[in-house]
Image (cartoon, helix red, strand yellow):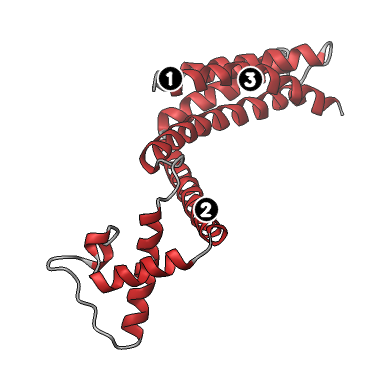
Amino acid sequence: MDFIKWFVGGLIGAAIGGAVWIAVGYFLEAEVGYIAWGIGLLAGIGVRAMAGNSEGAMCGIAGVLSAVGVVLLSKYLVISLHVNALIAKEADLGSRPTPNAMISSVAHEVVMEYEDAGKSVAWPAGMDPEEAYEQQHFPKDVWAEAKQRWDDLSPDEQQQQIDERVALVQMFVDQMSDTVKEEAFKESLSPFDLLWLGLAAFTAFRVGAGGTEE
């Protein structure tokens, strides 16, 4: 029970330094290694504030765990914030698909139906079917059929399809975002990170342990 209390104290102290790390990393787009050392120091101080007269290796270990955890989490959060901002900017997630965008999706379905039925599809000259998304990109008969199908839907059915598409796009973006964050976090780790992480852990242990050894 005491160990959990010490660990929580270390987390509280380390979180102060973690907030500084995140602010510098996100707003200044810089990673300052010695902030990790500061996180270790604050983690140790947090442990000491909770430990009172208790000293020793277990207090130090509580400091190490809290410091290392906050350093790694802060580093990941900075990457996550940058990735989220980039994806939001590029994907324009706040916008909803236009009627023409929905008709374009239906047009691709019409093309597949035509091809499955063995019916030829006369694409405009030089048009790559994989890049078709506007009316002028599709054969006139395909677009006309797709538009008719869309117009035949009731407003509620159209809204349902729009909502389903938004949800599908959001799911894809979330999956892509998680993958990018994971890979970026792995790529960001360097020998210098290990050096600063080791210094943070050492400082957290020495301060958290109260300067005694067991």
Q: How far from the left and from the top, in percent, is residue 11? A: 69, 23
Q: Position of residue 129 (x, y in %)?
A: 25, 68
96 or 172, which is in the foreground? 96
Question: In the rendered image, which quarter is residue 190 located in?
Answer: top left
Placement of 125 over or under 135, stated as above or below: below
Q: Nearer the viewer, residue 202 or 190?
A: 190
Q: Which residue is mark 1?
A: 27
As drawn, the label of residue 171 is 2
Crowding at mark 1 (Cα within 10 Å: few <14, some 14-19, many 20+) = few
> Circle 3 sits on which residue?
14
Is residue 64 visible to the viewer in this orientation of the structure?
yes
- Determine the secondary structure under disc 1: helix
**Residue at the right extreme, as displayed:** 1
180 in relation to 11, above or below: below
Q: Is residue 179 left or right of residue 202?
A: left
Residue at 45% over, 29% down = 193
Between the residue at mark 1 and the residue at mark 2, the CA separation in whole angstroms equals 28 Å
The N terminus lies in which quarter of the figure? top right
Q: Earlier in the sequence, mark 2 or mark 3?
A: 3
Q: Secondary structure at mark 3?
A: helix
Of 90 and 189, the residue lying toward us = 90
